[in-house]
Amino acid sequence: MSNQISDLSNPVKDEQIKVNVKLFAAFQEVVSKPEIYLEVPLHSPVSIIYEKLATVYPVLERWRTVTRYAINLNFADENTPLNYGDEVALIPPVSGG
């Protein structure tokens, strides 16, 4: 019998979660959908969403540095970790007058 106790507070490293991603403006035009679902590793930074989309849609690279993120309707830093049930919005720059 081992004296080691498993740390149950740390999830399995490769555990995947499904994230609902809301797309607006240029992102919606490129992807041709208002929202998509992506699977990402639990606690990945929100910026992984952009990485996955830009891999499939390279034209999105032009907006990388000016895109903002929101998680569950709150603006978030690109390094904010994702959790179960999170809804992510990619907010590109908009213009108008």
Image: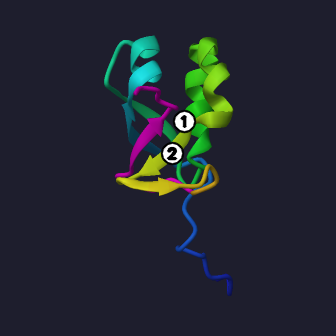
Q: Which residue is mark 1?
A: 49
Q: Quadrant of the N terminus?
A: bottom right
Farthest-out residue, left: 34
CB-based contact (under 8 Å), mark 2 and mark 1: yes
For the residue pair 63 and 94, the one nearer the viewer reads as 94
Give the x, y percent position of residue 63.
Answer: 62, 26
Dot 1 lies on which element?
helix
The magenta segment = 81-97
Examine the rendered structure and indicate whether residue 92 appears above or below residue 76.
above
- Which residue: 41% across, 26% down? 96
Above or below 56: residue 88: below
Place of residue 83 in the rendered image (x, y in percent of width and height, measured from the top left): 45, 56
71 magenta-colored = no
Magenta stretch secondary structure, dominant: loop
- Identified by mark 1, the residue type is Ile
Q: Is residue 84 visible?
A: no
Q: Is residue 72 left or right of residue 82?
A: left
Q: Of all residues shown, which one is farthest toward the front?
A: 97
| Residue type at numbered disc 2 | Tyr
At horizontal 38% and vertical 51% (from top left) the residue drawn is: 86
Question: Residue, x 53% and y 52% (percent of image)?
Answer: 42
Camera-nearest residue between 10 and 77: 77
Around disc 2, counting alpha carbons within 10 Å, would you say few (fewer than 14), some (14 to 19), or many (20 or more)? many
Query: Residue 86 magenta-drawn?
Result: yes
Residue hosting label 2: 69
Q: Earlier in the sequence, mark 2 or mark 1?
A: 1
**Residue name at image x 52 percent, y 55 percent:** 76
Q: Quadrant of residue 12?
A: bottom right
**Real-space CA distance between mark 2 and mark 1, rounded to the nearest whole angstrom:** 10 Å
Q: In the figure, residue 54 lies in which quadrant?
A: top right
